[in-house]
């Protein structure tokens, strides 16, 4: 990879030392590096290509780490990582032990905040800026907010609070849905450049003071001029009024791919002694034709060929199987509808949206609204299915409890990416949905181990279950060999070995690993296996079966506190079980890794299970 300018960048200060003539070639090298790295490792491409010039301008004008940048969502931080000391390790992006695909303060003091979930940056930056003000730190705090994040309510909560402060807070709205030439035109471009100059800001302040000081007519005259100016701005800048009413000085729109304009606007923002909203227009996928033409496809993409743009095609996964099943059920039942929070493709609903557009609702990055909206649909007689990643469902706990469970409204949660999730790290692991769902009354949880069980569980969730019914399944395809196990409608299946004194219990994807472990142990330490499909509430018969064994082991791909395995142990204790009970689950955050590496690290792979069953590995899964 030939990057003569980028190769000289060891820290943000090196960016400041470059000549203006070197900046455009630097941006080309950054795009080349990002495209080639994501092609090799997979990752977020289109959004990162859109903020290259903006990131370079930020590091020209501000000084990290004294000035702190909070990225929202963090997947647009690749250029920032390349410019802040991680260029030499960037080829390890999203690999086990490598550079995270999201901001991570543990990697660099230039990463101000972990941002893996959307709409959080303004609130975090508001807090950081306030702390600076309280401690006398004169640094600036900048929140770079993608326009998708503005579909989440927390972004507006942060904006409202931040606008009331008098801190050095700059919010950059990265708007990649607009075109400067189409929406603004020459006059607005001219006025935008004028407003984004230091001289204009200083002159405006002085002019206002002079006019207001004129006896008798000064203040009324100034108020009238402000009204005229506001009317003109409202015509030219459709989004400025709302932000200014919140308390921000509005700058823009600025061409997000023009380094001169960006640098000028950022320099101006530094001279305004109140919160600033800088509106920047960018284009997703800028600089790589395939991503430019299909930004949604190249938002988050697996490994691909740079020359052709063709991505690797894996085997069909649980997401696609769920989407296909929901299409079939919707054909039979006009009440069935689906909801997603900006994850239409990721949750396998593209075909459903095409076939049943009036029954498919993408509410944006608004999981809280999605749950309450679903509950309202249920009140009206619909059968709502909210398809959501496990990690994002966490945001809607209050709505599950207060807007759904209290009324015992019937909604279905199709929980995608349950369990360990590859490549995206701590913020995207699906290991917390079971612990918090078990605390919500009137909730039933299913966990299929293969596609056939998934179809059965979705039908059970829709038609045989009251209240909240959750069906959780992992990312990717069913484990090898599991498709041959015949599913049924029973809540559990027992695989009994007449020689066994040990019972191993599990559910979901881990069933495949348990079967492998049991097969290896058959001659030296036979075990019986019990696979749960309906995992909550735990079927009463399971406790009776467990009582027949002197040793019970529970393997679970979930955070331990609040897990099924923990609650199973408490239930055994209540029933005065006299044998040995060993739960193995997860007791920590899971960093960036592959699924195989994550299961191995937590002792939940087949080899780890064998060691634990034989007593060769002590302690809990970590």
Image: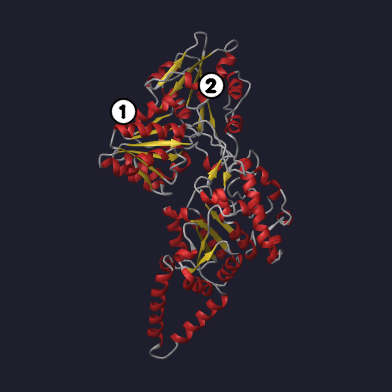
Residue 533 can be seen in this image: no
Image quadrant for the C terminus? top right
Q: Position of residue 598 (x, y in %)?
A: 59, 33
Can you tell which mark lies on residue 63?
none
Q: Position of residue 275 (x, y in %)?
A: 50, 67
Q: Is residue 566 left or right of residue 56?
A: left
Viewer-nearest residue: 138 or 230: 230
Viewer-nearest residue: 470 or 487: 487
Q: Residue 524, relative to residue 440: is it above or below?
A: above
Can you tell which mark lies on residue 464?
1
Q: Is residue 411 left or right of residue 273?
A: left
Crowding near the residue tagged with mark 2, few <14, some 14–19, many ≥20 C-alpha atoms within 10 Å: many
Task: Give the CA distance from mark 2 to mark 1.
Answer: 29 Å
Determine the secondary structure under disc 2: helix
Viewer-nearest residue: 333 or 179: 179
Crowding near the residue tagged with mark 1, few <14, some 14–19, many ≥20 C-alpha atoms within 10 Å: few
**Residue depicted at 65% across the width and 64% down the height:** 60
């Amino acid at each position: 990879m030939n990057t003569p300018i980028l190769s000289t960048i060891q820290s943000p200060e090196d960016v400041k030392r470059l000549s203006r003539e070197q900046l455009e070639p630097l941006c080309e090298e950054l795009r080349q590096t990002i495209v080639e790295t994501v092609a090799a490792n997979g990752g977020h491409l289109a959004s990162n290509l859109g903020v290259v010039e903006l990131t370079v301008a930020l590091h020209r004008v501000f000084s990290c780490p004294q000035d702190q940048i909070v990225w929202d969502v963090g997947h647009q931080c690749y250029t920032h990582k390349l410019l802040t000391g991680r260029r030499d390790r960037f080829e390890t992006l999203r690999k086990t032990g490598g550079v995270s695909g999201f901001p991570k303060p543990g990697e660099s003091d230039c990463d101000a905040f972990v941002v893996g979930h959307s709409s959080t940056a303004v609130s975090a930056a508001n807090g950081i800026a306030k702390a600076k003000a309280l401690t006398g730190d004169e640094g600036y705090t900048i929140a770079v907010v993608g326009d998708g994040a503005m579909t989440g309510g927390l972004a507006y909560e942060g904006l409202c609070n931040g606008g009331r402060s008098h801190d050095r807070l700059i919010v950059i709205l990265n708007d990649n849905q607009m075109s400067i030439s189409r929406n603004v035109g020459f006059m607005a471009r001219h006025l935008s450049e004028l407003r984004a100059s230091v001289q204009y800001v200083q002159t405006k302040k002085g002019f206002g003071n002079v006019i207001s000081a004129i006896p008798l007519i000064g203040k009324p005259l100034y108020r009238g001029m402000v009204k005229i100016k506001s009317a003109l701005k409202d015509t030219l800048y459709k989004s400025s009024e709302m932000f200014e009413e919140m308390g921000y000085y509005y700058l823009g729109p600025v061409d997000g791919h023009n380094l001169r304009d960006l640098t000028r606007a950022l320099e101006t923002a530094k001279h305004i002694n109140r919160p600033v909203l800088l509106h920047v227009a960018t284009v997703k996928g800028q600089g790589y034709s395939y991503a430019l033409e299909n930004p949604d496809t190249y938002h988050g993409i697996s490994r691909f060929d740079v020359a052709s743009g063709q991505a690797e095609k894996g085997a069909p996964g649980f997401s696609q199987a769920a989407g296909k099943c929901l299409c079939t059920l919707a054909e039979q039942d006009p009440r069935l509808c689906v909801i997603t929070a900006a994850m239409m493709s990721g949750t396998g609903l593209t075909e459903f949206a095409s076939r049943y557009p009036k029954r498919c609702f993408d509410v944006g990055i608004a999981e809280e609204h999605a749950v309450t909206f679903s509950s309202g649909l249920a009140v009206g007689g619909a059968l709502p299915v909210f398809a959501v990643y496990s990690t994002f469902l966490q945001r809607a706990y209050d709505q599950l409890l207060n807007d759904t469970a209290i009324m015992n409204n019937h909604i279905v949660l199709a929980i995608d990416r349950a369990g360990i999730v590859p490549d995206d790290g701590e913020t995207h692991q699906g290991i917390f949905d079971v612990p918090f769902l078990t605390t919500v009354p009137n909730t039933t949880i299913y966990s299929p181990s293969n596609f056939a069980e998934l179809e059965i569980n979705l039908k059970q969730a829709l038609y045989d279950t009251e209240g909240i019914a959750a069906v959780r399944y992992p990312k990717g395809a069913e484990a090898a060999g599991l498709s041959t196990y015949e599913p049924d409608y029973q809540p559990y299946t027992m695989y009994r070995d007449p020689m066994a004194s040990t019972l191993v219990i599990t559910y979901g994807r881990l069933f495949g690993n348990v079967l492998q472990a049991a097969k290896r142990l058959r001659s030296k330490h036979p075990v019986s296996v019990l696979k749960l499909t309906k995992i909550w509430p735990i079927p009463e018969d399971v406790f009776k079966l467990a009582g027949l064994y002197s040793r019970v082991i529970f393997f679970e791909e979930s955070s331990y506190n609040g897990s099924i395995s923990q609650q199973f142990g408490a239930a055994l204790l209540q029933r005065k079980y006299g044998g040995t009970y060993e739960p193995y689950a997860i007791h920590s955050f899971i960093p960036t890794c592959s699924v195989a590496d994550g299961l191995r690290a937590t002792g939940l792979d087949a080899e780890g299970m064998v060691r634990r069953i034989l007593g060769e590995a002590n302690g809990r899964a970590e």
